Amino acid sequence: MRTPVYVIGHVNPDTDSIASAIGYAWLLHERDGIDAIAARSGVINQQTSWVLDFLGLKPPFLLNDASPKFGSVAIRLDTTTPERPLSEAWGIASKTGGVAPIITEDNRPYGLVTGASLFKLMAEYVGPNAKSNETAVNQILELPCREAADTSIPHFNSSTRIKDLIRKVLHEEGDDFWVVDDNGKYTGIARKSDLIHPPRIKLILVDHNEAQQAVSSFEEAELIEILDHHRLGNLPTNSPIHFTVVPVGSTSTLVTERIAEAGLSAPPEIAGILLAGIISDTLHLISPTTTERDKNALKRLSRWAFAADSPLAKETIESYAEQILTSGSGLSARPPREIITTDVKTYEAGDYKFSISQVEVSDLYELGEHINDLRKALEEYREIKEIHFAVLMVTDVVRGSSRILMANPPAILEDLPFNPTQDGTLLAEGMVSRKKQLVPIILSQLEV
Ligand SMILES: [Mn+2]
């Protein structure tokens, strides 16, 4: 059985995280034949969902926890039904090493025929003295499967983490268990020995390299590679891995370069999502994080994306970029708490734990009517997360400036080089990048 490799961006994924995961999974599959699956940890934001819909792409697989699940060890054995003759179960069991799953007509677990359950049936029919009984094995094999099925086998949901129920597993007498989906339907059989040493989930991280931004339980996964464009966080690994961090505007840029290096060209919808990743992260090449490599990647993707039969056939790069940047913006469409949590990152520096959320608007004027609600939500978020302070960066993607709101800022942050405004927010003129502009300024204040 080949185990898949999940390509996954940071939690609370933005468009670049989703785009680079989809693009890189596509490349690994095309170039190396790897069973790579694009994944995400958390809900798709408004902007990304617009892009995916527009391109006709499905959101990546939802992987909220990298701890092995019952589903990861379930083996889909052949099955038969309760009324079929036991000879069928016998046939299955002889191929599977002694177990035959009996399921109902609508695919639900009925019982398992195992060595032990067969022996029990034999004992009932034959009695203690085999020689004195005429019942032939053939007659027993004609009985319906339900006669020999053990119906007391526990069920486990395929998305349940093994570590959460391993004690229960160890206390069970049998060696085989049902694994079912959310509707209670058969997905496979899990063996005790596999549950005790489950294979690790294989992960490739894109668009992040810090533990705090990675999918939950990632330390239980086998980390294969990191492809990113953020500052280094200390994420320890047990063995050497492929590690690429380049200061470019987006991870989608790096994925595009690798596709080109492989001598491939991406199909229009893959090129379209990678374009969206670059446009979203660099605000269509105006963010100071933008490099020549991003510009070149954008040009290359445009050649692939705006083909005649593409979902982008009627667009230009300008019209596409404008729709992407405005689809994610706005303060009115969502409740304040969602605005704070949609694109939030947490950091630790000096003695401080803090978060910086970012929201994009097409006009900072919008901020006025929402400012009190946002302030309240920011403080609530800070309390729930038990962090020292929380920051919200409201970025005007049209004019390229931001306003900064803070909940419980420490005194050490009083000297931030921004202009206070009448509503108590700070005006950060020309600042659009959390990563390259705001984070370094805050870190330098905290770490003196
Ligand atoms: Mn990015």
Image (cartoon, rainbow, N blue to C red):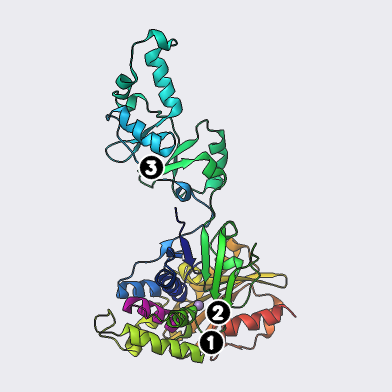
Q: Name the residue that disc number 1 marks.
A: 289
Question: Residues under labels 1 and 3: Cα distance?
Answer: 52 Å
Residue 291 picture location, percent across and down: 52, 90
- Nearer mark to the viewer, of 2 and 1: 2
Few, some or many C-alpha atoms within 10 Å of disc 1 (few <14, some 14-19, many ≥20)? many
Q: Name the residue that disc number 2 marks.
A: 229
Q: Is residue 268 magenta?
A: yes
Q: Name the residue that disc number 3 marks.
A: 77
The residue stretch that appears in magenta: 265-280
Whether ligand 1 has any atom under 8 Å from the Cβ at mark 2 is answered as: yes
Quarter of the image for residue 243 reads bottom right
Q: Among all residues in the image, which is located at the extreme right?
A: 448
- Amino acid marked by disc 3: Leu
**Disc 2 + disc 1, Cβ < 8 Å:** yes
At a point 64% along the width and 82% down the height, the residue shown is 440
Assign the C terminus to one quadrant of the image: bottom right
